Structures are given as C-alpha cells and as structure tokens.
Image (spheres, rainbow, N blue to C red):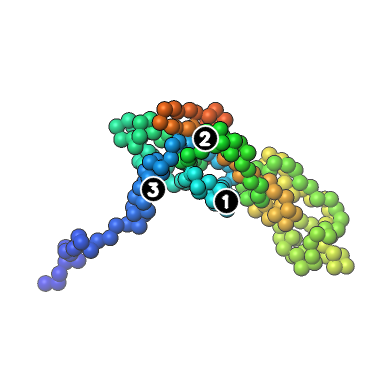
C-alpha cells in the first residue's frame, strides 16, 4: 500500500521561523533598546514621504536619536498597549496615536530642539500621480526651447500638442498641464518633472510626546493625523 502524503513526520528542530516574524521580532527588540537609551519619545506623522530625505534626517540625528517607521502593531507591542504591558510608565499612551502615516522618534534632545527641528524641516520634490496640484500650470502656444528635438515624441505622449518646427519643439496651442486643487494624472506628473516644477513638500508633524514625567499632545500634528485618516477612508 502506498504511503499517505498527509501523514508525514516533521522534525521540529529543522523547522525555520518565517522571515517576517524574525524581522518583526528584531524591530521590537530595537525599539525596546531605544526606549532604554533615550529620555523621550515622540509619535510623528508626515505628508509626501520621501525616503532619501528621511534618510538624510536620520543621518543628521544619529548621534542623539533613533527613528522608526514600522508596522503599527509591531511598534505598539514594543511600547505596550496598556499599563499592564508598557515598557515604561505612561509609554502605552503613545500607542493610541500610532495610526495611519506615523512613526516613532526616540531622542535625548531637549524638547525645544525637537519642536524647532520638526517645525523647520521640509523637503521639496516632484509630485507623484494622484497628488493634488498646488497651483495651475499652463503653457502658452509657441516654442519650448528647453526641450531638445529628440524629446518631441515623448512630450507628445504626455498629451501636449507639439510639433517640430525647424528642429525646435513647438506648442501649437495653449495647454493646461494641471489645475490647482485637482489630482495629477500620470501625464501631468511627468510633464511637471520635465518642466522642473516641484509641488510636493515632505513635512513632518509631531503628534505627541512622552517622557518619564510628562505626556503631551500636539494639536497641529493631531489635526494632520486626523485629516490623513479621513483621506484614506474616503
């Protein structure tokens, strides 16, 4: 009788943990270590995330701080979700605000320095498809001398009414690339990049702060967090 494929012995010593679980466990450990090494912790939210600009900020703060952007449940587990399982007294209060686009900052910097850093930090970049245009951009009929003749086919694919006139890319009619307050199409986003027009501003907002003797909520950051959640649910 052939052996059943359903009844196979499994040697438990040879089973491997799933990479995802190992990665989450490592993040929890690193957050718990950051809690011990730093005097205060913040929840922050953000608009128009740009990874390179966040990396630059991490490098700027690496001697005094640690930033985490991880799964919300993983960060909540590390902090604790109630007084019974919190890593330090009062730290579970941060978990409530870990929702939507949020991260954690652990730091030894004074509160005033952190608040000033977040208030002044911003990074301009090109807007992506679906972003809301911050201004109306209209091109007038005539030569587009900033573009070489080799680019004419690509520009035409973006919906611009162009032609080559004696080797010069020429717009044969006025063209509205985007309108203020409306989402950018893929073609509009590409065209704005070609024109060098940056509409996306990467901003960070403090939502709340914890220290061993204090807890504070920031109204502006909380409003941004609430607005972001409303946008995601709409």
Q: Nearer the viewer, residue 92 or 4?
A: 92
Q: Going 47% across and 45% down the picture, which residue do you hit?
A: 66
Q: Which mark is residue 30?
A: 3
Residue 220 percent location from the top left of the image: 57, 30
The x, y position of residue 211, in whole percent, is 43, 32
Alpha carbon distance from label 1 to label 2 = 20 Å
Q: Secondary structure at mark 1?
A: helix
Q: Which of the two discs, 1 and 2, labels the residue nearer the N terminus?
A: 1
Q: Which mark is residue 56?
A: 1
94 with respect to 198 (left or right): left
User: Is residue 225 in view?
Assistant: no
Q: Earlier in the sequence, mark 2 or mark 3?
A: 3
Residue at position x 56%, y 48% in the image: 60
The residue lying at 37 percent from left, 53 percent from top is 23
**Which is more toward the observer, 174 or 87?**
87
Q: Position of residue 25 (x, y in %)?
A: 34, 50
Camera-side residue: 169 or 54? 54
- How would you rate the neighbour count of disc 3 (Cα within 10 Å): few for under 14, some for 14-19, many for 20 or more? some
Residue at mark 2? 110
């Amino acid at each position: 009788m052939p052996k059943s494929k359903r009844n196979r012995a499994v040697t438990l010593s040879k089973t491997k943990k799933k990479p995802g679980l190992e990665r989450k466990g490592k993040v929890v450990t690193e957050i718990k270590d950051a809690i011990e090494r730093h005097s205060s912790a913040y929840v922050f939210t953000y608009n128009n995330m740009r990874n390179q600009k966040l990396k630059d900020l991490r490098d700027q703060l690496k001697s005094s701080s640690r930033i985490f952007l991880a799964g919300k449940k993983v960060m909540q587990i590390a902090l604790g979700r109630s007084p019974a399982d919190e890593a330090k007294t009062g730290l579970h209060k941060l978990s409530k605000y870990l929702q939507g686009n949020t991260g954690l900052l652990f730091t030894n910097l004074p509160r005033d320095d952190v608040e000033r850093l977040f208030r002044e930090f911003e990074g301009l970049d090109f807007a992506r498809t679906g972003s809301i245009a911050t201004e109306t951009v209209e091109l007038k009929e005539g030569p587009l001398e900033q573009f070489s003749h080799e680019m004419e086919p690509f520009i035409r694919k973006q919906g611009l009414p162009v032609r080559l006139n004696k080797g010069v890319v020429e717009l044969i009619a006025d063209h509205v690339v985007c309108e203020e307050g409306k989402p950018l199409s893929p073609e509009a986003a590409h065209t704005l990049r070609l024109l060098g027009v940056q509409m996306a501003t990467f901003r960070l907002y403090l939502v709340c702060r914890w220290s061993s003797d204090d807890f504070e909520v920031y109204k502006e950051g909380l409003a941004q967090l609430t607005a972001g959640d409303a946008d995601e649910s709409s």
